[in-house]
Image (cartoon, rainbow, N blue to C red):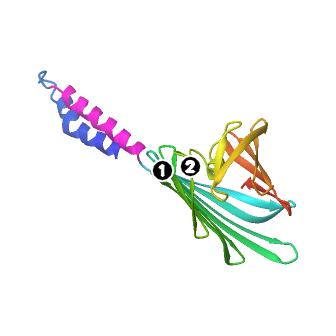
Amino acid sequence: MIPALIIWLFKKYIRPALQNKTLPSVNIFGPLRWAAMVAALLCLASGAVAQEQTVKYNVLHSGKVVGHMNLYQKRQGDELYLKMISEVKMRFIFSVKVEIQEESTFNNGKLMSSQVCRNVNGKEKCNRQTKAVASGYQTIAEGKCGKVDQKQIAANLMLLYCHEPADQAQVYSDNFQQFLLVKQVSPHVYRIDLPDGNYNFYSYANGVCSRVDIHHSLYTIQIQLA
């Protein structure tokens, strides 16, 4: 759009002025200033255009790919929307298929809403929501209401896939609906202990999460950039 505008301005104002060399009184700087102002406004407007990205991960168990996870990001102005969809198929005594869908919306660095849905073998096992309200946050877990007495949640576990955290930072767990401590264990590697006794390691390369090691009491899986 901007190149088309420049071409139009050139044809309408600049080229006629250059061709009419015998008229020194022709002032092309007025139109040029106007063109520069319009181009600058259009550049600012283009910054408000949504920026979308999808990052793909593989889920591995014992070195074998057992699932996939996609993280979709959409930035527009001060708003950030995240959506994560994962599907994992594993076999213990019997086959287990786990499907998880998570969504988060941030505005000006504040979590406005989030939702976690988890299905196991086609049956819903988890449906939890967090929503910003005047007094803090309202939560719903499998139909039961609760609250989080915090004016602003600046980061949740989903956001860890987009940004490397700081040591001793707190992040909000949309699943457990409480804050968790982030502990740096080595350069660009962080550990988060979960309330159920399990723990995860988050590893980063160039500021982006490249691997997550999930240590569960029954299994260990890795989530790696595809």
What secondary structure prevails in the magenta region? helix
Residue hosting label 2:
149
Which amino acid does the dot numbered 2 rest on? Answer: Asp
Instruction: Assess whether residue 38 is covered by the magenta stretch.
Output: yes
Please report the residue visible at 68 percent of the width from the left and 69 percent of the height from the top. 99
Please report the residue visible at 28 percent of the width from the left and 33 percent of the height from the top. 37
Q: Seen in the image, is 178 located left or right of residue 29?
A: right
Tell me the crowding category of disc 2: few under 14, some 14 to 19, or many 20 or more residues within 10 angstroms, Cα based. Answer: few
Range of magenta residues: 27-48
Q: Position of residue 107 (x, y in %)?
A: 47, 48
Name the mark on residue 135: 1
Name the mark on residue 5: none
Q: How many dots with numbers?
A: 2
Tell me which numbered mark, 1 or 2, is placed earlier along the sequence.
1
At mark 2, the secondary structure is loop
Is residue 159 or residue 132 the one in the foreground? Answer: 132
Image quarter of residue 224: bottom right
